Image (cartoon, rainbow, N blue to C red):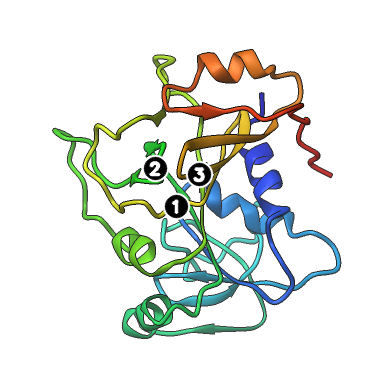
Amino acid sequence: MLDKNGIARRIAKELRDGYFVNLGIGIPTLVANYIPQGIEVEFQSENGVLGMGPFPFEGEEDADIINAGKQTITTMPGASFFDSATSFNMIRGQHVDLTILGAMEVSENGDIANWKIPGKMVKGMGGAMDLVASAENIIVAMMHTNRAGASKLLRKCSLPLTGVNCVKKVVTNMAVLEVTNEGFKLLERAPGVSVEDIQKATEGMLIIDGNIPEMILD
C-alpha cells in the first residue's frame, strides 16, 4: 500500500497545465512536492497565498510564510499574499480549478466529513465549507481505513458532514476511485494491492468493471 507521499504523487498526476489548485490540510499539502514536469500550476491556500511551492528544506524555513495548516512553505516567483476576504472571493467565485482535501469519511454518493469528530475539541471548520460549496472538481486524499481497520469509504457518513454530493474522486493508500451515481467505481489499485483487498476494506458500494490496473506513479 502507499504511504502519504505515494497518495500525493498519484494525485499530482491529476494536475493540468494552467490549473489553479487549492490544497487542504494534511496529505494534500504534499502534492506541491510532486508537480509533473512540463506543466505549471498555481497553488492557493485560503490563508492568503497564491503561488505556493514545495516544502522548504530543513534550515531554510521562514516562519512568516505558512499555509492554512500553519506549516512553513516556499513560494514560487510571482507569488502573492492577500487577506482572507480576497482569498475566499477566489474560492466562492469559482476561480479554483481543482480542490484537494483530506477527509475522515466519504460516502458512496460523494458526501464528505472532514471537519469534526463529536466530543473532540476543534478550533472551527476553517475554509472547508466554502471549498466544498464552491468547487466543481474535488479530489479527496485519505487513508482507506482508520486506525482500527474500519472502512472510511462508507454507504453513509457517520460524522457531521462538510458537504453533500460533492466529491468527484478519492485517492487512498489502496486505490483510486471515482464517485458515480451507483457508488465508488474502482479505477486503479495500489501496487501489490488486490481487488479483493480493496473490496474487504470498502463498506460503500464498490463497482468493479473489467481488469483493474495498478497505479503508475512516475
Residue for badge 3: 179
Packing grade of label 3 (10 A; few <14, some 14-19, many >=20) is many
What is the C-alpha distance between the residues marked 2 and 1?
A: 23 Å
Q: Are marks 2 and 1 in contact (CB under 8 Å)?
A: no
Residue closer to the observer: 22 or 64: 22
Residue drawn where x is 31% and y is 83% of the image: 85
Earlier-in-chain disc, 1 versus 3: 1
Label 2 packing within 10 angstroms: few (<14), some (14-19), many (20+): many
Q: At 76% across and 35% down in the image, what residue appears?
A: 215
Res. 73 visible in picture: yes
**Amino acid type, mark 2:** Asn
Residue 3, given in percent of the width and then of the height, sits at 63, 31
Position of the C terminus, as image quadrant, is top right
Question: The residue under label 1 is which amino acid type?
Answer: Ile
Asked if the residue at tag 3 contacts the one at tag 2, i.e. Cβ–Cβ closer than 8 Å, the answer is: yes
Q: Looking at the image, is mark 1 or mark 3 nearer the viewer?
A: 3
Query: Mark 1 = which residue?
Result: 25
31 up-or-down from 85: above or below? above
Residue nearest the viewer, comparing 176 with 71: 176
Q: Residue at x 59, y 61 (%)?
A: 61
Q: Position of residue 97 (x, y in %)?
A: 56, 71
On the question of residue 59 being in view, the answer is: no
Q: Nearer the viewer, mark 2 or mark 1?
A: 2
Which residue is identified by label 2? 109
Q: What numbered label is drawn on residue 173? A: none
Q: Quadrant of the N terminus?
A: top right
Q: Amino acid at mark 3?
A: Val
